[in-house]
Image: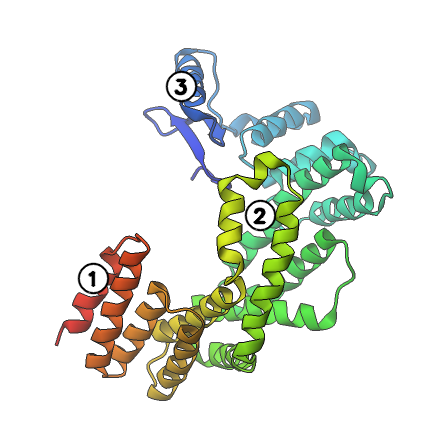
Amino acid sequence: TYTITAYPTSLYVNGNGDLIQRTVGYSGIPGMLAEAQKAIAAANDPNAKVILSQASADKSRDPVALAAYLAERTQQYLPDGKALDAYLTLIPEADWITDANLKLIAGNITSSDSKVFRVLLDSVSTIRANPAYMTNPVMKKKVQTFTMPLMRVSLRQLDQANTEADMERAIPVFLNLSTTMSGKPAVAADQKKAANTLRSQFYLRTKNADKYRPLASAEGNRLMAMPIDSVRARNEVLARQLKTSIDALPDSLKSSPFASQLRSSANTFETTAMSFYLTNLAGSYYELMTDKEDLNQALIWSARALEYNRDASALNTHAHLLNKLGRKAEAINTQEEAIAAAKAKGEDLSKYEEGLTTIKQP
């Protein structure tokens, strides 16, 4: 209803559900109190208009009035693609690329099918191609302002794809946008891998086991083909690289919690990541598949994940796969190990304890 596009977002509404004020971001308790006071003042102002009321804007053929309305929607993070399209028909196309209009487009674009999606994307490419871009904070800020709504629209198109045709239309948009944002030429192999990842996510979301299986299997084979020793060796390489990066930080950042967390995780970063990928893959089979052959394949991936990292999450997935395959005693022992692992790290035990209760059921 209120088109939430970022978190946290605070909405101040009246008794009818009309939006009086909208605040994106968090500025502490004093900031929240100040915003609440503004909302109370707006609610008590008889001349104040509710933000979601757009009847006058819909009927307007005045580009100045529409521009003002779109600027307000931009400020409130409430894009109105319909009003944007109406506004653009009232001004020369050559004026679309002025800084003011590009800002209105960025704030109100809602579809990648819109002609201005390409206009905004071309503007990003033009700015990034400028030799001064890397050292110009104004240009960098402008690119950020333009790419955020483009990415929002692209991701939303992927999330809302209901058919394979929808997905296949959304994938090139996302890949093109990603290439533009990277500033590097597209590599065919990388593009294919990214496209297949997006297809896998779609088939998993739509519970299409037959289409999901070959893509997931190919990814599983790729991960399983990596020798464990070579993955562990990359831990050492990354740890050295991170140490060099941390040593180059200012003293105030070297002692920060973030730097400490990096140091503690560096020695196991690659193996932890591999365990995560394999566990997710096995978990997707647990959720989607019913065939015993599929579940046994997932168990192989899960077992490899445990070779990298016997953390609570990986153990939990392994236990549930064992249980689904009818190996209840092994499942109980593995889930008890998951609880112990979570307890040792001070994690919330409720999910794992509930899992144990489920596994123990006849």
The numbered mark, 1 or 3, whose residue comes first in the sequence reads: 3
Mark 2, secondary structure of its residue:
helix
The numbered mark, 2 or 3, whose residue comes first in the sequence reads: 3
Residue 354 is tagged as 1
Disc 3 residue crowd, few under 14, some 14–19, many 20+, Cα 10 Å: few
Provide the residue designation for mark 2. 152
Provide the residue designation for mark 3. 33
Position of 16 with respect to 205 (left or right) is left
Residue farthest to the bottom? 293
Residue 346 percent across, percent down from the top left? 30, 52
Q: Let me know if residue 251 appears in the view.
A: yes
Asked if 290 appears above or below 358 in the picture, the reply is below
Q: Nearer the viewer, mark 1 or mark 2?
A: 1
Disc 2 residue crowd, few under 14, some 14–19, many 20+, Cα 10 Å: some
Residue 172 percent across, percent down from the top left? 66, 63
Q: Let me know if residue 202 appears in the view.
A: no
- Disc 1 vs disc 2: Cβ atoms closer than 8 Å? no
For the residues labelled 1 and 3, the Cα–Cα distance comes to: 40 Å
Task: Identify which residue is drawn at 54% across, 58% down.
Answer: 266
Position of 9 with respect to 94 (left or right) is left
Disc 1 marks which amino acid?
Glu
- Disc 2 vs disc 3: Cβ atoms closer than 8 Å? no
Residue 272 percent across, percent down from the top left? 47, 65
State which quarter of the image contains the N terminus.
Answer: top left
The number of numbered badges drawn on the structure is 3
Position of 29 with respect to 135 (left or right) is left
Disc 2 marks which amino acid?
Arg
For the residues labelled 2 and 3, the Cα–Cα distance comes to: 29 Å
Say which quarter of the image contains residue 318.
bottom left
Position of 288 with respect to 174 (left or right) is left
